[in-house]
Image (spheres, rainbow, N blue to C red):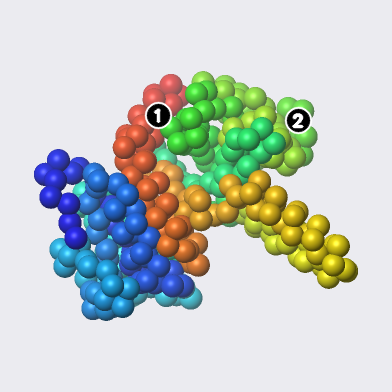
Amino acid sequence: MTKNNNDIKCIIAVDAMGGDFAPKNVILGALDAFNESNDFQLILIGDKEKILSTAREENISIDDNMILHSSQVIEMGDSPTQALKAKPDSSIVVGAKLVKDKKAHAFVSAGNTGAMMAASTLIMGRIEGVSRPTIGASFPTTQNKFCLLFDVGASVDSKPQHLFEYAILGSIFAKEIFNCENPSVGVLSVGEEESKGNELSLAAHKLLKESKLNFIGNVEGRDIVKGNVDVIVCDGFLGNVILKFGESVLALLKSRIKDYAKKGLLNKIYALIVKKVLKASLSDMDYQTHGGVPLLGVNGISIIGHGSSSPLAIKNMVLRAKEMYDKKLIQKFQEAIKDYAATK
C-alpha cells in the first residue's frame, strides 16, 4: 500500500504504539489520512508483527515498506527523560531521530506526552533562537473564530523572553493555520491596564509593546472566548489550568442536561432537543476535529495527541502535520526568530 510517486517530498512518521488504543486506532487513522491525501509518504513506527497482525484483523493491506520496526514502547506511566535513555529503540525515540536525521519531516504520536515533548526538544533540537518550545490550545469564541493560548503545559514556569517567543511562534501559527492576516496578541493578566499584573506579565508586556507584533496589551480570562484577540500568551502553569478547566465545561453541561431529563417526560424531550443543538453548535470543541497540538519551537514538526485518540483524531493529527509542512512553518518560524533576534 504505497504511492508510486517520485515527486513525494513530505514524509510523516507516526508512532503506531502510542495511545491507549494502539496500534489499532493509530493504523486506522493514519491510513485514512494517507488515503485522503496523495502526496506524502507514511511511516508507521512500532512492533512490526503487532502492526501487521492488527492490519489482518481489520482486513487492511499494509506494505512492509511502510513499517519501521522498533522493539520498545514508552508506556504512559514511564518517566519521560528516563525512558528516553532506557528505551533507545522505542517508537518515540526512533520517530524523533527520523526527523533529526532529515529522514522524515514530521512525527506524530498519541503516546506519553512528556516523553514526546522531551524527545522532540532533546533529539530534534530547538530552532536557533528559541529558548523554550511551547504548545498551544485553540478556544472557540463568540465571533466564530478561534483564540490561541500559549503556553498550555510545555513547561510550568516561564520568563518574559519565553512569552515573547510564544507570541512570535503563535502569531505565525495563527496566520498560516487559522488564516489570521495580522494576528492580534495579548498578555493574560488580571486587568486591561498596563500597570496591572505580576512581574512576569508586566515584563512580557514591555517586550511585546516594543516589538513589531500586533500587540493590543493586557487581556483578561473572559477575553479568551470573546474573540477580540487572536493569540494570548501566559506561563504554562496558568495556561494548563485554563485548558483543563475549559475541557471540563462540556462534561458539566452534559451532566446538567442529564439530571434535568430525569425530572419527567417533558423534561426529557426538551433535554434531547437541547443536547442535539449543543452537539451541533459546540462541535468545534471536540478535540478529535483538531487531532493534536503541535510543539512549536522545535526544529521539526512534532504533533502530540491525546492518549485516548480515536482514528479520526489520529487522521487529523497526520493531516495537520502535512499542512504545517506544506505551509513551510518550520522555515517561517526560523526566519521570524532570526529577524527578531537581529533587531535587538
Q: Is residue 295 above or below residue 117?
A: above
Q: Which mark is residue 305?
A: none
**Residue 106 percent across, percent down from the top left:** 31, 50
**According to the image, label 1 marks what residue?**
336
Name the amino acid, label 2. Glu
- Name the residue at 54% across, 54% down: 287
- Name the residue at 40% across, 29% down: 336
Quadrant where the N terminus sits is: bottom left
- Name the residue at 31% across, 78% down: 57
**The one of 133 and 256 positioned closer to us in this rendering:** 256
What distance separates the C-alpha of mark 1 from that of mark 2?
28 Å
* Image quadrant assignment for residue 286: bottom right
Lateral position of residue 79 relative to residue 252, left or right? left
Quadrant where the C terminus sits is: top left
* Image quadrant assignment for residue 146: top right
- In this figure, what is the number of numbered marks? 2
Which of the two discs, 1 and 2, labels the residue nearer the N terminus? 2
**Residue 326 percent across, percent down from the top left:** 31, 37
* Label 2: which secondary element: loop
**The one of 34 and 121 positioned closer to us in this rendering:** 34
**According to the image, label 2 marks what residue?**
192
**Residue 182 percent across, percent down from the top left:** 52, 23
**Residue 29 percent across, percent down from the top left:** 38, 60
Name the amino acid, label 1. Ala
Q: Is residue 308 above or below residue 281?
A: below
- Name the residue at 77% across, 66% down: 258
* Label 1: which secondary element: helix
Q: Assess disc 1: are there few (<14), some (14-19) or many (≥20) residues with their C-alpha within 10 Å of its C-alpha.
A: some
